[in-house]
Image (tube, rainbow, N blue to C red):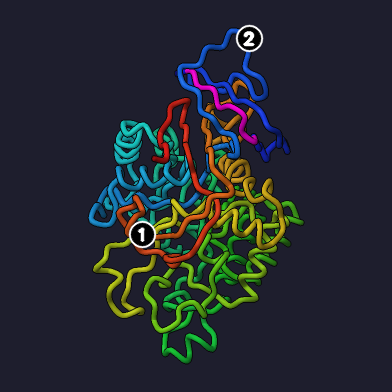
Amino acid sequence: MKILIRAGRVIDPARNFDEIADVAIAAGRIISVGTAPEGFSPVRIIEAGGCIVAPGLVDLAVRLREPGHEHEGMLESEMAAAVAGGVTSLVCPPDTDPVLDEPGLVDMLKFRAEKLHQARVFPLGALTRGLQGEVLTEMAELTESGCVGFSQAEVPLQNTQVLQRALQYAATYGYSVWLRPQEYHLGQGVAASGPLATRLGLSGVPVAAETIALHTILELVRVTGARVHLCRISSAAGVALVRAAKQQELPVTCDVSINSLHLTDVDIGYFDSRMRLTPPLRQQRDRDALRQGLADGTIDALVSDHTPVDEDAKQIPFAEAEPGATGLELLLGLGLKWGQQDGVGLVRALAVLTCEPARVLGSALGTLQASAGHLVDGGVADVCIFDPQATWTVEPARLRSQGRHTPFGGHQLQGQVRCTIVGGQVAYEAM
């Protein structure tokens, strides 16, 4: 379909482009940014005056809950939530049921996702069989099936020798390994260690759970040369370690969740199970360090950490509640809110949602590599059009995700998605 997006403020953070321009799309590609080519006859014209035309958002942490957890989220509902939030590409972890440790399971997930013609899905394969932390998976076969990296999801590897072998193998063949740094034995609590957890009588997760794991991972990266993406950093000490590692030019990247970026342990209040999250919400000094790390490039990407949770799993005591919250539809608004509050500017706020996460994926994007997260002539036509002045209130009951639990219920956000285009096709349009 030929589409002309007319008179929008086009922002491409990857090349610092920010101008009022037209965007012409044909055959799933952007054929021009600026003025439509002579003789271009669009089938559809989208008037974007007053709106921002940006690359489609790339979310590096999205649980689709299928297969195995359909009572918490169906592929249809979560993909609809993605495009409604302006997300055109997403990475899903391997902790489905069954675990994504066989090529056939990956093929099935990608086939189901492609049939929906909505956001692009990039699965992570399991690093070890069944996420048991004992036997490495067949990484080559999983890569051929479309896995963009390998992960243990939320299951820490207790055996350091297995982790070392995994990183050695990944380094040999150029695969990336995605790890959430948390030491297994110290990470068994339900809230961040501190005065609030003590006062509420909740078992704590100390910052050391993150830093011990980070030290281990970074030392193994140093000796193996493997590319590692650190998922959902949560502490000031963790940010400092990542900053030092990058200064030493270790091949590491990292992300932070919208929850850790905006909330602290104080928000738990009186055992509010909506705040039962992984990693746990930490103190204000940690949140401030995370925001600064995202601003200065120590942290590469902002993620939704979208984890739909069933109603029954949240309406129970805090310590027993299942951790997780929906976030796909909130990612853009919360990213823009951070950018405005911290004065980093709209371009940087969009960069951590588009070109920077695409850079983390790198060569794993295949044919999309050169243009994902960008708006360039000849690039893939994944576009998010949003009104930066429109304000809306987060009403959980109106979210498209099957999981309606969010810590941000009742919050007012600025920036509302008007249209999402994936591969040159309109995947979502606000009514």
> In the rendered image of this protein, does residue 392 appear above or below residue 364?
below
Q: Quadrant of residue 212?
A: bottom right
For this view, does 10 lie left or right of residue 191?
right
> In the rendered image of this protein, does residue 4 appear above or below residue 124?
above
Residue 158 appears in the picture as rendered: no
Q: Quadrant of residue 153?
A: bottom left
Magenta residue span: 2-9
Along the line of sight, the residue nearer the viewer: 188 or 164 = 188
Residue annotated with mark 1: 132
Quarter of the picture holding the C terminus: top left
Along the line of sight, the residue nearer the viewer: 378 or 4 = 4
Magenta span contains residue 169? no
What residue sits 60% from the left and 21% below the top?
378
Along the line of sight, the residue nearer the viewer: 175 or 77 = 77
Along the line of sight, the residue nearer the viewer: 194 or 399 = 399
Amino acid bearing label 1:
Gln
Residue 240 appears in the picture as rendered: yes
Amino acid bearing label 2:
Glu
Residue annotated with mark 2: 38
What residue sits 35% from the left and 79% below the top?
319
Residue 268 is situated, as x and y percent measured from the top left of the image, at: 45, 78
Residue 309 is situated, as x and y percent measured from the top left of the image, at: 32, 62
What residue sits 31% from the left and 77% below the top?
320
10 Å neighbourhood of mark 2: few (<14), some, or many (≥20)?
few
Residue 96 is situated, as x and y percent measured from the top left of the image, at: 32, 52
10 Å neighbourhood of mark 1: few (<14), some, or many (≥20)?
some
Secondary structure predominantly adopted by residues drawn in magenta = strand
Q: Residue furthest right?
A: 247
Helix, strand or loop at label 1? It is loop
